[in-house]
Image (cartoon, grey):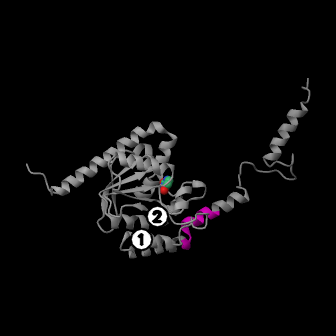
Amino acid sequence: MTPPLDTAATESLLAFWRDAGVDACFGDAPVDRTHVEPPPALKAVARATASVAVTPDADDALADARRVSAEADTLEALAAAVSGFRGCPLIGMGARQAVFSRGNPEAPVMIIGEGPGAEEDELGQPFVGKAGRLLDRMLVEAGLEGRVFITNTVFWRPPGNRTPTAAEQAVCAPFIERAFALLRPKVVLLLGAAAIKSVLSTDEGIMRLRGQWKEWRLAEGAVSAPAMPTLHPAFLLRQPMAKREAWADMLSLSVRLEEIEGALTHGTQNCPKKG
Ligand code: URA
């Protein structure tokens, strides 16, 4: 026996298909549904994304970033070069201003985060929001207050605080590398997955890499320093249980810095051990 028609359920099902874009029950010709053609909007997105990586514009912007960053002889000049730079795709996506750095230009510790958020965008300095206040408290407790130079992988706020793309990070990288070369920090702290991706060129997860010392070495100029990947303070605000690991990383950084400074003071840096 045919079950009675449930009109409400049928209407609801038809509404579901209509919302999904099905506006006819059959067509004039058979359709091969095994071949999935992306809708035009998705095709446009795919074209735009592909062009980010390969357009001559992106190459020009990268060349420009390398040139103007290399010309900067001080961190102050580098900050001015960032402000004058127009080649990052994030410019024009709603950011109010460039956010380059804050902290001590002679600091022994360089800290690299992901990218400016709303408060940073407003004030023009990195890590001045909630995550920054947590970072500052940790630095004070670790005895590193006033001993850090802080920057990000990108200098313009990504819309909606999304993660910066590889292309956006790539065009900012020459400025970060130049900052590293000018500052010559003794140790580097990398905050979160975006920072390790940009600086260490790895897709390995932050949970795997955190707490393990890496070496950040520039291709040119014999500049290198030990780098510690750790959890981003914004993540710690969402997952307070993870603070224990981040604190262990911070202490490891502070101990390593002490060892390096102690070795330099006593002239034992790079001296082979006797015996
Ligand atoms: N998060 C970052 O990664 N950087 C900032 O400057 C602020 C929040």
Residue 117 visible somewhere in the drawing: no
Name the residue carrying label 2. Answer: 100
Per the rendering, the mark at residue 78 is 1
From the viewer's side, name the closer residue of 96 and 45. Answer: 96
In the rendered structure, which disc, 1 or 2, sits on the residue that comes first in sequence?
Answer: 1
> Residue 62 appears at what percent x and percent y?
48, 71
For disc 2, the neighbor class at 10 Å (few under 14, some 14 to 19, many from 20) is many
Q: Residue at x 54, y 66 (%)?
A: 97
Instruction: Please check the rendered image and state whether residue 247 is part of the magenta-colored stretch, yes or no.
Output: no
Q: Is residue 262 left or right of residue 51?
A: left
For disc 1, the neighbor class at 10 Å (few under 14, some 14 to 19, many from 20) is many
Q: Which range is magenta?
A: 47-57
Three-letter residue code for mark 2: Phe
Quarter of the figure with residue 102: bottom left
Residue occupying the far top of the picture: 1
> Residue 152 appears at what percent x and percent y?
46, 59
Q: How many marks?
A: 2
Quarter of the figure with residue 244: top left
Quarter of the figure with residue 2: top right
Q: Mark 1–mark 2 contact, CB under 8 Å?
A: yes
Per the rendering, the mark at residue 58 is none
Q: Is residue 43 above or below residue 9?
A: below
Three-letter residue code for mark 1: Leu
Q: Is residue 165 left or right of residue 41?
A: left
Mark 1 element type: helix
Q: Is mark 2 within 8 Å of ligand 1?
A: no
Q: Residue at x 45, y 73 (%)?
A: 81
> Residue 141 appears at what percent x and percent y?
35, 45
